[in-house]
Amino acid sequence: MFESTSKKAALVLQDGTVYEGKGYGPLGTSEGEAVFCTGMAGYTESMTDPSYHHQFLTFTYPLIGNYGVARFLSGESGLPAAFESDAIRTRGIIAHEICERPHHWACERTLSHWLSDEGVPGIAGIDTRALTKRLREHGVMPSVLHVYEAGDLPDLDRLRARAQRMRDPTDGNLVSEMSTPVTIEYNKGGAKTVVLLDCGTKYGIIRSLLRRNIHVVQVRYNTPLDAVEALNPDGVLISNGPGNPDKVDTVQDTIAGCVSAGIPTFGICMGNQLVSLALGGKTYKLRYGHRSQNQPCVEVGTKRCYITSQNHGYVVDPASLEGTGLDLWFSNANDHSCEGVISRTEQVCAVQFHPEARPGPRDTDYLFDRFVGMMEG
């Protein structure tokens, strides 16, 4: 199982900053947005989260890979137990140290083996603390990750020039690349039917519904309203996903139609942004986003604070909710950004954080029960 690496790598940010270290995965040059996550565990779940599509994920915890990578074994309804999709979704990973001798009863291969098997590049042995401080100060930014053989000399000037030419890798309809191409059904005999508009959904969302005996119909994000209604849903859930919500086509019409038809509607992460946009709200991009398992969120009008798992770069502008029929539901205790919206009729609501966790705390798992309650009238 042990695998050492003799490769080298260079991470070049758009501002010209260079970090050199050990290289992992395939040789070559990749482009992505450098972001950071402050979680202490859950690297397999994070790396398979479709919301990280087109991003280089920096792990701020100084060591990852120490419990290796488990098998893609089927768990609930055929979904793998330790992963949030069927493959690594990050464009690459950045770490201070990658453990090359993991120890865990479920470990099948090392993290470096996994990167090689799936053709995903990585860099380790760099000062991730300094990198994180730079991204917090100047914002997440387009970057180039170059993996090369030890002994070679990378052309850093060329890499800098390439990074400087890059546009924002997430400023597009990335949902179209992560959404299911076909309709998938789970638990056909379930008590209620939920149509899941898949914008790049995590398996954790599906698991959370299945545990409540829900019949889940997972459909492509741009499924039109009449096709959704033909499935006779008791509720509609709009999932998480990558990229700029303003660039996601047609789905807003479907969401607005579901709300107008009185179908109980629930959004998660990207779903929170799309629900708000569909009803007239606006979104903007945060300087460095929320990517962690310890984000405190306060339920507006109460003294309740929940610790949540998050992964997003865009948020809803609370000032834009006036006239939409939506009110601010949750607020981030750190920066006071919008963490959820709710309608006055309470037939539509959405949260920016991840109540399904995976990885992270389960403080807000009850929101799935609330969604079931909405469907039960």
Image (tube, rainbow, N blue to C red):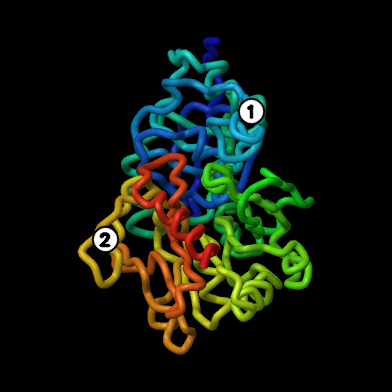
Asked if residue 326 is positioned above or below residue 292 in the image, the reply reads: below
Residue depicted at x 50% and y 65%: 374
Q: From the viewer's perspective, is 331 left or right of 266? A: left
Classify 10 Å Cα crowding around label 2: few (below 14), some (14-19), many (20 and above): few
Q: In which quarter of the image is residue 334?
A: bottom left
Q: Residue at the left extreme?
A: 303
In this orientation, which residue lies closer to the viewer: 32 or 293?
293
Q: Element under label 2?
A: loop
Q: Can residue 244 be seen in this view?
A: yes
Q: Is residue 125 above or below residue 281?
A: above
Q: Residue at x 45, y 52 (%)?
A: 354
Mark carried by residue 128: none
Of all residues, the one furthest to the top in this rendering is: 1
Number of other residues with Cα within 10 Å of mark 1, as a class: few under 14, some 14 to 19, many 20 or more: few
Front-lying residue, 371 or 243: 371
Residue positioned 78% across, 66% down in the render: 230
Query: Taking 264 as reference, is 330 left or right?
Result: left
Q: Quadrant of the N terminus?
A: top right
Disc 2 versus disc 1: distance between alpha carbons? Answer: 38 Å
Q: Nearer the viewer, residue 71 or 55?
A: 71
Q: Position of residue 175 (x, y in %)?
A: 65, 58
Which residue is pictured at 59% across the width and 34% down the height? Answer: 76
| Residue at the spot of label 2 | 334
Task: Tell me the residue that label 1 is attached to.
Answer: 74
Q: What residue type is labelled 1?
A: Ser
